[in-house]
Image (cartoon, grey):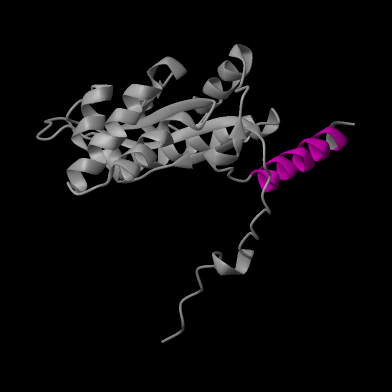
Amino acid sequence: MQDRTASDHGHWAQALIQGRHSTSPRRLCAPGPDAAQQQLILAAAAAGPDHGRILPWRLIEVPLAQRARLGAAFAAALLERDPQASAEQLAQAADKAQRAPWLLLALLRLNAAGAEIPQIPDHERLLSAGAALQNMLLQASALGLGSSLTSGQALQSAPLRRLFGLADDEMALCFVNIGHVVQPRAVRERPAVDAYFSRLAAPTPS
């Protein structure tokens, strides 16, 4: 019975992992996850690996009431990059803040410059954040929700850093977009295992 349960769990996990795919914010619609679902998704993030238990990442929700401020930061970031941006382009940049029903910004805390005590390397911090984000996406998928991670040049802009009050040692990684799927898309083909897997060969006799 125990072996059967383990097998069932394995098949369920495989179906969940292989069935997860990204859904563009344009294809997400309200309602977003309810309060209980949000807590499940947020709690899933904490199950990721975290060397040293330093919690090198954090998440900031952008409520609907604050989306206009985020849109203004997107537009300002575009204007910084391209002072000749048209009114239409600025409006399109601002509109990106309105798409996802539930929107979060993921931040990574980097090593403090000149720290005397050795700290967890930045690449391990990034891996921890990536694992946390993947857990969130899988939990959203398990709840029947669509999700995606989005980035862009605005993430590293001064207007966005000011809006979210980022510390000097923090970097904006991506936005997490979650909602119901209004327009499914074809699932992309996964790469074959042989494309990314190999074994360390035994040394050749000299």
Q: Residue at x 24, y 34 (%)?
A: 119
Image position, residue 75 (x, y; %): 28, 36
Displayed quadrant of residue 189: bottom right
Displayed quadrant of residue 19: top right
Image position, residue 150 (x, y; %): 44, 42
In this rendering, the answer to whether 75 lies above or below 196 is above
> What's drawn in magenta, residue-wise?
4-20
Query: Does the magenta portion include 5?
Result: yes
Query: Does the magenta portion include 56?
Result: no
Q: Is residue 170 left or right of residue 25?
A: left
Judge by depth and name the residue closer to the eye, 54 or 174.
174
Q: Residue at x 46, y 77 (%)?
A: 203
Specify the farthest residue to the right.
1
Residue 154 in view in this figure: yes
Image position, residue 77 (x, y; %): 24, 39
**Position of the N terminus by quadrant:** top right
Judge by depth and name the residue closer to the eye, 107 or 78.
78
In this rendering, the answer to whether 40 lies above or below 99 is above
**Position of the C terminus by quadrant:** bottom left
